[in-house]
């Protein structure tokens, strides 16, 4: 059980560090006389863009790049689409 907790803690830490350097969130601090306000702003649009970019890169590396909108789908001479499709 403690191994699972350690793995989850490490994954959370890696995610936090990655998010900080990718500007997914910012942390600011405002000192007042009796209080300290800590604000966390999350940039959801930046996260979506980075996830889409990563997904596109994985698809390109795996050879599953989406076809261009103008180009018809590639068809082999036997009438089948590549990768066993029809």
Image (tube, helix red, strand yellow):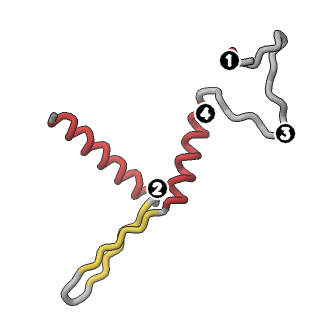
Quick one: SS at disc 3?
Answer: loop
Identify the mark nearer the N-term, 1 or 4: 4
For label 4, the residue is 59
Single out the mark in the foreground, 1 or 4.
1
For label 3, the residue is 70
Task: From this view, report whether residue 72 is shown above or below residue 48.
Answer: above
Q: Position of residue 8 (x, y in %)?
A: 27, 41
Residue visible at 42% across and 56% down in the picture = 21
Task: From this view, report whether residue 28 is shown above or below residue 35.
Answer: above
Q: CA distance from mark 2 to mark 1?
A: 35 Å
Q: CA distance from mark 4 to mark 2?
A: 21 Å
Identify the mark nearer the N-term, 3 or 4: 4
For label 2, the residue is 22
Q: CA distance from mark 1 to mark 4?
A: 14 Å
Q: Position of residue 18 (x, y in %)?
A: 40, 51
Identify the mark nearer the N-term, 2 or 1: 2
């Amino acid at each position: 059980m403690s191994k699972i907790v350690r793995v989850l803690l490490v994954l959370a830490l890696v995610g936090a560090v990655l998010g900080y350097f990718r500007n997914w969130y910012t942390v600011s601090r405002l000192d007042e006389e009796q209080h300290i306000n800590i604000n966390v702003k999350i940039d959801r649009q930046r996260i979506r863009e980075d996830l889409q970019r990563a997904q596109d890169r994985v698809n390109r590396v795996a050879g599953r790049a989406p076809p261009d909108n103008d180009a018809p789908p590639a068809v082999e001479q036997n009438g089948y689409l590549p990768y066993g499709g029809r």
